[in-house]
Amino acid sequence: MTKTFAIANQKGGVGKTTTSVNLAASLATFNKRILLVDMDPQGNATMGCGINKNLLAISVLDVLTGDTVTEKALHRCESGAFDVLPANGDLTAAEVELLKLPSRESRLRHALARVKQNYDYIIVDCPPSLSLLTVNSLVACDGVIIPMQCEYYALEGLSALVGTIGKIGQFLNPGLQVQGILRTMYDPRNSLTNEVTGQLRQHFGDRVYRIAIPRNVRLAEAPSYGQPALVYDKHSKGALAYLGLAGEIIRREKAARAQTGTTG
């Protein structure tokens, strides 16, 4: 059974794209079939996979508007061994274009339904805003992984995002839930980091991933080479942390299936 996760946080600079690319690459190392969907007009996930966003003839925008079918827009991240539905600046037009179309909140869900059976996991990189693109992403997904820094302002933004997830789950995508909270740019030597971690565990319990992503220069360098950190430097602390996250996600899915008696 395919699991589709949105990587979302309306606050910028928390590691959404870094998480999307490196989680996709890490899950692929476990022999999982992965699709990464770039829903951010900045196209950073696309570039981070070694795909030149400026040379795209077809992108996720064409899929959302119905100008092409999903299969024709897919690219391969050769270094990471997963597929990519890429984006570029043309996606900024989506807000206006989608307003004219029927079922504007569920265009991505319908587009992914064509290819969903080909993948074990679909990862959707959301833009840093609560826009119609983000709504499309959340409507298309089973759960939301929220990357966040351990600081107090981040807690305020988290509350707003959880409220939005609840509303979309209520009106547009029944069953949508917070899949997990991922602590990024993590420094355990910082007392504030430990205080915020304690608050997160108090409110979200085991939905806070045990793995935290440390500050790591290799994670910052890898996108400029168009590679996941796992390819750029597989021994770096950042790459190993994302491998650990992928393992934790897979174990959680197995445990959930065992509990419900499902397979796949």
Image (tube, rainbow, N blue to C red):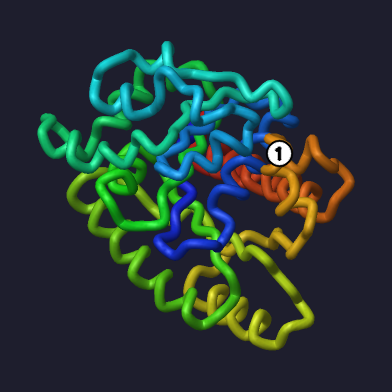
Horizontal placement of 170 versus 84: left or right? left
Q: Name the residue at 55% across, 59% down.
A: 147
**Residue 207 visible from this viewpoint:** no
The residue where tag 1 is placed is 228
Within 10 angstroms of label 1, few (less than 14), some, or many (20 or more) residues? Answer: many
In the foreground, 88 or 77: 88
Residue drawn at x 31%, y 14% as measured from the top left:
68
121 in relation to 164, above or below = above
Give coordinates of residue 9: x percent, y percent.
44, 59
Q: Of the residues shown, which amino acid type is indicated by label 1?
A: Pro
Which quadrant would residue 121 be assigned to in this image? top right
Mark 1 lies on a secondary structure that is: loop
Residue 169 horizontal/vertical position (percent) = 27, 51
Query: Can see residue 68?
Result: yes
Count how many numbered circles sit on residues in the image.
1
Q: Which residue shows up at 13% across the image and 30% down it?
A: 101
Q: Nearer the viewer, residue 108 or 141?
A: 108
User: In this view of the protein, which residue sits in the foreground, 9 or 162?
Assistant: 9
Please report the residue visible at 65 percent of the width from the left and 26 percent of the height from the top.
Answer: 32
Nearer to us in this view, 17 or 44: 44
**Percent x, y for residue 233?**
85, 42
56 lies left or right of 197: left
Residue furthest toward the right? 235
Q: Quadrant of the C terminus?
A: top right
Q: Is residue 263 left or right of residue 248?
A: left
Q: Position of residue 251 (x, y in %)?
A: 66, 43
